[in-house]
Image: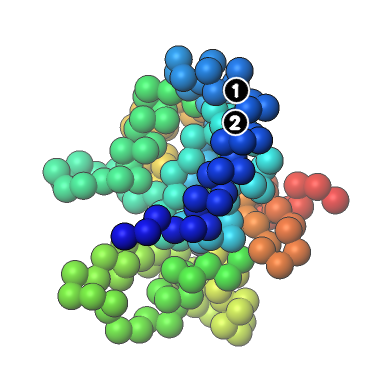
Amino acid sequence: MTFPTRLETGYRSFLGETFVRERGRYERLATGQRPEIMVIGCCDSRVSPEVIFDVSPGEIFVARNVANLVPPYETSGKYHGASAAVEFAVQALQVKHIVVLGHEKCGGIEAFMAGGEPLSSGDFIGNWLSLLRPAFANVEKKGDFAQRRRALEQATIELSLTNLMSFPWVARLVERGELHLHGAYFGVGDGVLTVRSEDGEFRRLVR
Ligand SMILES: [Zn+2]
């Protein structure tokens, strides 16, 4: 099996240029990471937090999943990838900020709204996206499909922030002012980043 050529080409370029230039940084990072910011984003190939925020290795701790969801806190003994990432970031790394980064034209959210057939017998996506249901209740009547999708994309960010507060140690640190939760929304076509204000509105970070 051939390793993907695009990745080999990219790695050669990284090794010959970036790694050489940033060698000191990588050597320092090899002793450990201390990122102060966690970003919870979508798997979508167009929405890479490291690219959007122009950060270097070691600066942000990133967890990506379909539709940038955080499930409610529950310890059912099943496998909780998203919750484990939050736990590691908060408890072990002691990050100061968690940013939930949603985006325009999210395929996961669109699939949920379209309510199509399950993709597989296990249908992991359908089950995962059922987390969106509480957010959907508020946006069902908001205009045409595109407007409802945008409303749901932003409501999903809100839902993930609410669910984060259901983790007892997250709520405790937020109440103490030692951890700050943020919502952000990225427009793929125009590059506009809006950030959730206290009143729940999303406003441009940079004008
Ligand atoms: Zn997405």
Q: Ligand 1 closer than 8 Å to the CB at disc 1?
A: no
Q: Give the residue displayed 40% in from the left and 55% down from the top.
A: 3
Mark 2 touching mark 1, by CB under 8 A? yes
Give the alpha-carbon distance from disc 2 to disc 1, as whole Å: 5 Å
* Residue type, label 1: Arg
The x, y position of residue 189, in whole percent, is 71, 67
Labelled disc at residue 38: none
| Residue located beneath label 1 in the image | 23
Dot 2: few (<14), some (14–19), or many (≥20) neighbours within 10 Å?
some
In this image, 204 relative to 140: left or right?
right
Question: 46 or 8: nearer the eye?
Answer: 8
In this image, 19 relative to 8: left or right?
right
* View extreme (left): residue: 77
* Residue type, label 2: Phe
The x, y position of residue 33, in whole percent, is 48, 22
In this image, 137 relative to 47: left or right?
left
Q: Ligand 1 closer than 8 Å to the CB at disc 2?
A: no
- Element type at mark 1: helix
The x, y position of residue 122, in whole percent, is 19, 69
In this image, 79 relative to 69: left or right?
left
| Residue located beneath label 2 in the image | 19
- Element type at mark 2: helix
Dot 1: few (<14), some (14–19), or many (≥20) neighbours within 10 Å?
few
Q: Is residue 180 visible?
A: no
| The quarter of the displayed image where residue 46 is located | bottom right
Q: Give the residue displayed 55% in from the left and 73% down from the top.
A: 149
Q: Give the residue displayed 43% in from the left and 82% down from the top.
A: 114
Q: Give the residue displayed 14% in from the left and 43% down from the top.
A: 77
As displayed, is residue 4 above or below residue 94?
below
